[in-house]
Amino acid sequence: MRHGKKFNHLGRTASHRSALLSNMACSLIEHKRINTTVAKAKALRVYVEPLLTKAKEDTTHNRRIVFSYLQSKEAVTELFRTVAPKIAERNGGYTRIIKTGFRQGDAADMALIELVDFNELYNPNEEEKKATRRSRRPAAAKKAEAVVAEAPKVEEKVEEPKADSTEEKAGE
């Protein structure tokens, strides 16, 4: 029975599982998204999100704690330099799991796990904010410009032919 066993063992020994999750976390931090099975993606989310929370505060202690999990200087540097500033305002939910179908060889349920703030294509919150800002400002600006721009143009067009015709007559 598995009473009280809350996390997925992924069919591996403890050392193999920790090495697997450490390597996957390093890959996720370096590449910003990885393709894996749904079970591994869910286990990785539980593993990496506390590390991302630690990275929000850049102290020597937090760097050492994160390094003890990741065992990669490059990944720790990338995490604290590029990832942490982007997720600084977010209160959790740093990763997104998108199911992508089934693997051809063994029909395993596959998923794409990615860092939410690094996907410019699929970021619904930011697009909505930009869309509302863009739709409000240009609409008001276009109306103001249209009213201001149309009136002088009509007057100028009317005045220019009169001015040209009078000058031509005076010149003759």
Image (cartoon, grey):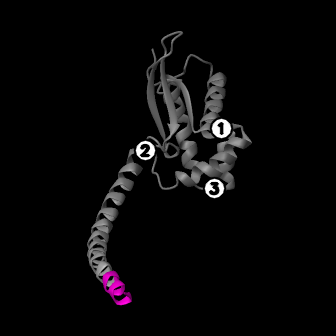
Which kind of residue does numbered mark 3 sit on? Asp
Specify the label residue 45 is tagged with. Answer: none
Residue placed most toward the observer, 110 or 60: 110
Q: Is residue 45 above or below residue 1?
A: below
* Number of on-image labels: 3
Work out how far the residue at label 2 is from the one at label 1, CA to CA, in angstroms. 29 Å
Question: Which residue, given by chain and number where applicable, does mark 1 sit on?
Answer: 69
Circle 3 sits in a helix, a strand or a loop, which is it? loop
Residue 116, image x and y in percent?
A: 48, 42
At horizontal 54% and vertical 9% (from top left) the residue drawn is: 105
Q: Which mark is residue 58?
A: 3
Residue 128: give x, y in percent of width and height: 35, 51
- Above or below residue 136? Residue 20 is above
Disc 3 to disc 2, C-alpha distance: 26 Å
Of label 3 and label 2, which has the lower sequence position?
A: 3
Label 1, residues with CA under 10 Å away: few <14, some 14-19, many ≥20: some
Give the dominant element type of the magenta stretch: helix, strand or loop.
helix
Q: Residue at x 65, y 22 (%)?
A: 16
User: Which residue sits furthest front?
Assistant: 172
Q: Quadrant of residue 71?
A: top right
Task: Specify the amino acid type for callout 2.
Answer: Asn
Q: CA distance from mark 3 to mark 1?
A: 16 Å
Q: Position of residue 94 (x, y in %)?
A: 49, 43
Q: Is residue 19 left or right of residue 171?
A: right
Whether 144 is among the magenta residues is no
Q: Which residue is mark 2?
A: 123
User: Residue at the spot x=46%, y=18% of the render?
Assistant: 2
SS at badge 2: loop
Badge 1 element: helix
Q: Which residues are magenta?
A: 164-172
On the image, the x and y values in percent for residue 81 come to 65, 52
